[in-house]
Amino acid sequence: MRIYKEFLFEAAHYLPTAEPGTPNARIHGHSFRARVVIDGEPDAVTGYVFHFEELARAMADTQDALDHRLLNEVDGLASPTLERIAVWIWNSLANRVPGLAEVQVSRDSCGEGCVYAGPRATPRMAAE
């Protein structure tokens, strides 16, 4: 079973790798939506996969670190593409949210988003 909780944040950014003079090379802002998805089985006693209040507490620091910020100044987001923002959110929650399965980041006004399902597992080498 999967559950999710969303948070919103408003932030500015620019893309250092964008062609000079293009809109993405200049500072501009977006309204972002982040969805955190947890995979698990409901507890036999509580019925919860993960309590939503606990999830909200875990997400609060992440939201605060991004909301009303210049994302380029956030440690680890020097070039804040949707892809990098999704990985950054994953990394900020991975040790706090058991069963973390997916982070989605979208800019609804642009109809754009990114879905990140965590780092790829490294294939095991066969025994020699």
Image (tube, rainbow, N blue to C red):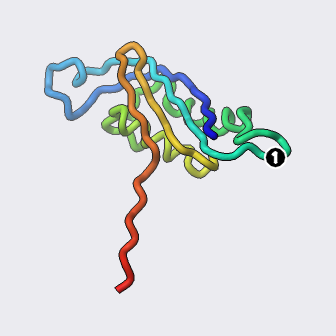
Mark 1 highlights which residue?
Answer: 44
Q: Residue at x 61, y 30 (%)?
A: 5
Where the N terminus falls, by quadrant? top right
Q: Residues within 10 Å of mark 1 (few under 14, many from 20)?
A: few
Q: Secondary structure at mark 1?
A: loop
Q: Quadrant of residue 37?
A: top right
- Whether residue 74 is visible to the viewer of this picture, yes or no, is no
Q: State how many labels appear.
A: 1
| Residue 60 locus on image (x, y percent) | 62, 33
The three-letter code of the residue at mark 1 reads Ala
Residue 47: quarter of image: top right
67 with respect to 3 (left or right): left
Q: Position of residue 4 (x, y in %)?
A: 60, 32
- Which one is nearer the viewer's eye here, 33 or 126? 126
Q: Which residue extends farthest bottom?
A: 128
Residue shown at the point (55%, 49%) measured from the top left: 94
